[in-house]
Image (spheres, rainbow, N blue to C red):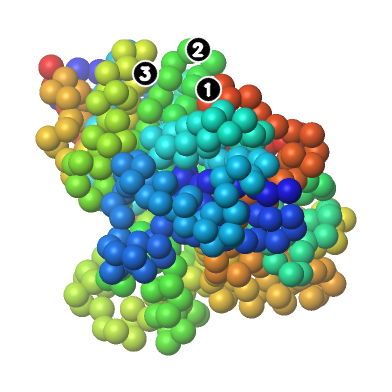
Amino acid sequence: MIILGIETSCDETSVAVVKNDSLAANLISSQYFHKNYGGVVPELSSRAHLQIINPLVKSALEKSSIQLDDIDIISATAGPGLIGALLVGLTYAKGLSLSLNKKFVAVNHIEGHIFSGFLMKEKPEFPFICLVVSGGHTLLLLVKSFTEIYKLGSTVDDAAGEAFDKVSKLIGLGYPGGPKIQKAAEKGDPNRINFPIAELKEPYNFSFSGLKTAVLRYVQQQGGIQKIDEQHIFDIAASFQSAVIKALIQKLKKAIGNFDVKSVSIVGGVAANSLLKEKAEQLSSKYNLKLVIPSLEFCGDNAAMIAFRAKTLFENGITHDLNYKPYPSLDENSFLSL
Amino acid sequence: MNFPCERISHSEEETKLIAEEFLSVLKPGDVVVLNGDLGTGKTFFIKKITEALGITKANSPTFAIVNEYESGQDTRIYHFDFYRINKVAELHDIGLEDYLADDEAITFIEWGELFPEVLPHKRYEIKIEEVSNEQRKFRFNKFT
């Protein structure tokens, strides 16, 4: 069985081919642009998706040594994401499905992330607790099977990755916030400033907006960013990073304690953070659980996770009509079995 | 509420009351621009308005650029954030005009001041300033 996956929910255009049980291609536009156009970063737009999608599909087919007609299932992200961007990938996939007369599967982007651990050699075992942490999402879930996903909690304001980006800009480290803060934090003292961790009524929810404001206020109290020396910046970065990771680990620990699970999986762009990895390793070994964190290639937005999710949906008898519409937000009931 | 006007909030509870007061003047088709520095509570204010409409899931659209919410009372909400936008062309490409032309929706735009040229003339503007740690000053203005 050959599955084509297309992901265009936000900034990245990505196309992947899953051939039987292995990943034959996983091309991501930023890398593609980098290689082919000498480091041109595509602008934030659906036109950029439109320009790159066809050559990217062609390259993915070449890389997998297959023809269009060899594909059995065509899949694309349907949401959540930027509606114009989603439309490009979804409509392209539907058109391909119609013209080739192949099955079509619409994939929820978050479900793609949730099962991205299965792209690794060491896979999660059901049931598992999944922490989705990226620039746009922060969710905690109980995953019992490929068709039973229960949302335990989510962020009530900013996503964890968004907090990294905004604080990084605030303390003059720039974009992308995740790696910049992590690097600065390595040289800083995480105990110098006691940034707050939000206390929320809902046990598994997150809030990072207050933390961002606390960093802003701290910077203002010092008389602005110009008055803060380099070591002090490193200490702010380390203290901030430590507060974010503490909040994530705290909720993860609560979920692990309350549900009988076999493994833990941390997915999404922020899963690349080394402090989060280190703390999650300590936690999972304490509870004797298997920990799966996808490699960098599968942590960010990618089509491999979309193609893989489409495969598991198809294997559970789920395909979609060609009138399937994209959805911008993650509705309360948009997960399977919620 | 008569425009222009100012409100001072000393707590989250008071911000909720101000949000509800402002909501009472809004009608479908309205556009509300929110300006104010990082951390002044633009998203929080919109969250309080949408909660009054029975929408519980409003959160930051910084990453997605625009969130859409649907309330039980058939009010559609578009919640934009221009923070991550680099140039006007990106907004055209996202289809901002189409969102703004939706007469059945209320559109909120965080960081609208970054691209004043795309804002409709007829709009509400809210400037949020931090007075002290917990205090916020809201300045409401209406352009017709």
Looking at the rendered structure, the secondary structure element under dot 3 is strand
Give the mark nearest the N terminus, 1 or 2: 1
Q: Position of residue A208 (x, y in %)?
A: 48, 55
Between disc 3 and disc 1, the foreground one is: 3
> Quick one: quadrant of the N terminus of chain B?
top left
Residue B65 or A288: which is nearer the viewer? Answer: B65
* Three-letter code, disc 2: Gln
Give the mark nearest the N terminus, 3 or 1: 1
Estimate the spatial distance between the alpha carbons at disc 3 and disc 1, rounded to whole Å.
15 Å
Point 57% across, 76% down: residue:
A275
* Three-letter code, disc 3: Ala
Q: Residues within 10 Å of mark 3 (few under 14, many from 20)?
A: many
Q: Which residue is mark 3?
A: B105
Between disc 2 and disc 3, the foreground one is: 3
Point 40% across, 62% down: residue:
A32
Question: Would you say the residues marked 1 and 2 are in contact, meaning their CB atoms lie under 8 Å apart?
Answer: yes
Looking at the rendered structure, the secondary structure element under dot 1 is loop
Residue A125 or B107: which is nearer the viewer? Answer: A125
Evaluate whether label 3 is on the same chain as label 1. Answer: yes
Q: Position of residue B62 (x, y in %)?
A: 38, 46
Give the mark nearest the N terminus, 2 or 3: 2
Q: Is residue A97 in view? A: no
Q: Residues within 10 Å of mark 2 (few under 14, many from 20)?
A: few
Q: Which residue is mark 2?
A: B73
Estimate the spatial distance between the alpha carbons at disc 1 and disc 2, rounded to whole Å.
8 Å
From the viewer's perspective, is residue A278 above or below residue A324?
Answer: below
Evaluate whether label 1 is on the same chain as label 2. Answer: yes
Which picture quadrant has residue B56?
top right
Which picture quadrant has residue B16?
top left
Evaluate whether label 2 is on the same chain as label 3. Answer: yes
